[in-house]
Image (cartoon, rainbow, N blue to C red):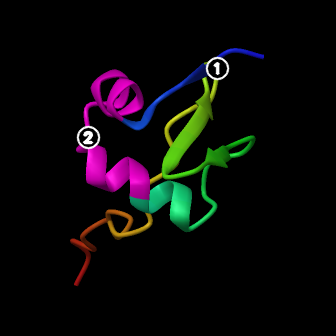
Amino acid sequence: MEYMSCPEAAKKWGISERRVQRLCEDNRIPGISKIGYMWLIPKDAEKPIDKRKRPKMKNDTQN
């Protein structure tokens, strides 16, 4: 299996390196490994859904 680093994942997913590290710490990316201080992320891993955002609600226009 091929791996990428946090900076590579951040660039690929369009988020900050710190956010990728936080996703790793929270175990939100399947297949990750940590060697020393470095996180290894599978190259085929998909960006996790951001749970910080609320789903958009439809405005009820009926009165």
Q: Residues within 10 Å of mark 2 (few under 14, many from 20)?
A: few
Relative to residue 60, is residue 32 drawn left or right?
A: right
> Furthest-front residue in view?
36
The kind of secondary structure the magenta stretch mainly shows is helix
Name the foreground residue: 15 vs 25.
25
Name the foreground residue: 8 vs 36.
36
| Count of numbered tags | 2
Residue 62 to residue 35: above or below = below
Q: Residue at x 28, y 44 (%)?
A: 17
Relative to residue 50, is residue 27 drawn left or right?
A: right
Give the magenta-colored segment's residue range.
Answer: 7-21
- What residue is shown with label 2? 15
| Amino acid type, callout 2 | Ile
Q: Residues within 10 Å of mark 1 (few under 14, many from 20)?
A: few
Dot 2 or dot 1: first in sequence order is 2
Q: Measured from the top left, where is residue 55 in percent x and y?
A: 38, 65
> Furthest-bottom residue in view?
63
Q: Measured from the top left, where is residue 2 in percent x and y?
A: 68, 15
For the C terminus, the image quarter is bottom left
Q: CA distance from mark 2 to mark 1?
A: 17 Å
Residue 3 included in the magenta stretch of the image? no
- What residue is shown with label 1? 44
| Amino acid type, callout 1 | Asp
Q: Residue at x 41, y 54 (%)?
A: 21
**Label 2 residue SS:** loop
Q: Residue at x 72, y 45 (%)?
A: 30
Which quadrant holds residue 14? top left
Residue 30 to residue 11: above or below = below
